[in-house]
Structures are given as structure tokens and as C-alpha cells.
Image (cartoon, grey):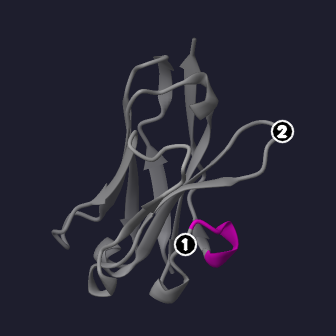
Amino acid sequence: QVYLVESGGGSVQAGGSLRLSCTVSGQPAIDLCLAWFRQAPGKEREGVARLNAVHAGFTSVYANSVEGRFTISRDRDRSKNTAYLEMNSLTSEDTAMYYCAATQDVRACSLTSARYNYWGRGTQVTVSA
């Protein structure tokens, strides 16, 4: 079993930055495919970024809407079981609840929410114009 707890959300003005954290327990984060999703009111859940396990190449993929602005990362140290989402140049379109997700199946590592079987409860990000 894997448990995920997000933190770091809040309110920020357009153009600002935030860093979200996802604390992982139950399994070393470096052995998991980890991803960030977001869901705005009235919209479907959207995959934002994913980072594969170290043994699967440690590759990252981003949604077109955040490419160049967001960076997903993870501590390589096994004792620091945390993943991050660094968000820069935020706009009102980035306002949403952000969720951390994980899967042990590194072959399923993608921006498709159905591929993930572990989810956090989310952290709210609000960007004001």
C-alpha cells in the first residue's frame, strides 16, 4: 500500500510561482511512477506531469499546457520520500485542485489517470489575475 499526502498549495497572483510537495509512504518514491494531476471545477481531471521510477529511466513527461513552466522532480535519496511540482509563470488557467498519484507499474507511467491506483487528497492552487 502506498500513501500520498500533498502540500504547498495556496493563492498566488498571475505570474507567480508555487512548489507543491507529495510525501510518499509505504514504498520508496524512487521505485514508483509518480504523477501530478489537476481538476478545475466543471472540468475533467487533467494529467500535468509524470516522472518514472529511477530503475525505469527517471524520465519525465509534461502536458502541453504546462511544458516549460512546470517541473516535476523527486529526491534521489531513498530516505527522502518526497516528490515535487515546481510551478512558474502561473496563470488563472492553472487554478485547480492538484493531486499526486502513484503506480508501481512503471510500464503504465503516463498522464492517464486510470493508470494510477494510489491518490492523495489534493491541494488547492488558486491563481488570481
Q: Nearer the viewer, residue 66 or 106?
A: 66
Say which quarter of the image contains residue 82: bottom left
Residue type at mark 1 is Ser
Query: Which stretch appears magenta?
Result: 111-115
In what element is the residue under mark 2?
loop
Identify residue for label 2.
42
Q: Is residue 93 magenta?
A: no
Figure check: 76 above or below 93? below
Q: Where on the picture, by quarter, is residue 101? A: bottom right
What whole-number distance in Å separates the C-alpha atoms at marks 2 and 1?
23 Å
Q: For residue 81, what is the image quadrant? A: bottom left
Residue drawn where x is 79% and y is 43% of the image:
43
Task: Give the residue at mark 1.
Answer: 110
Q: Residue at x 66, y 53 (%)?
A: 46
Residue 112 on the magenta segment: yes
Residue 98 on image: x %, y %: 57, 45
Using the image, determine if residue 33 lies above or below residue 65.
below
Camera-side mark, 2 or 1: 1
State the residue in front, 27 or 98.
98
In the picture, the disc for residue 37 is none
Residue 63 falls left or right of residue 20: right
Which secondary structure, mark 1? loop
Q: Residues within 10 Å of mark 1 (few under 14, many from 20)?
A: many
Q: Which is the main secondary structure of the residues drawn in magenta?
A: helix
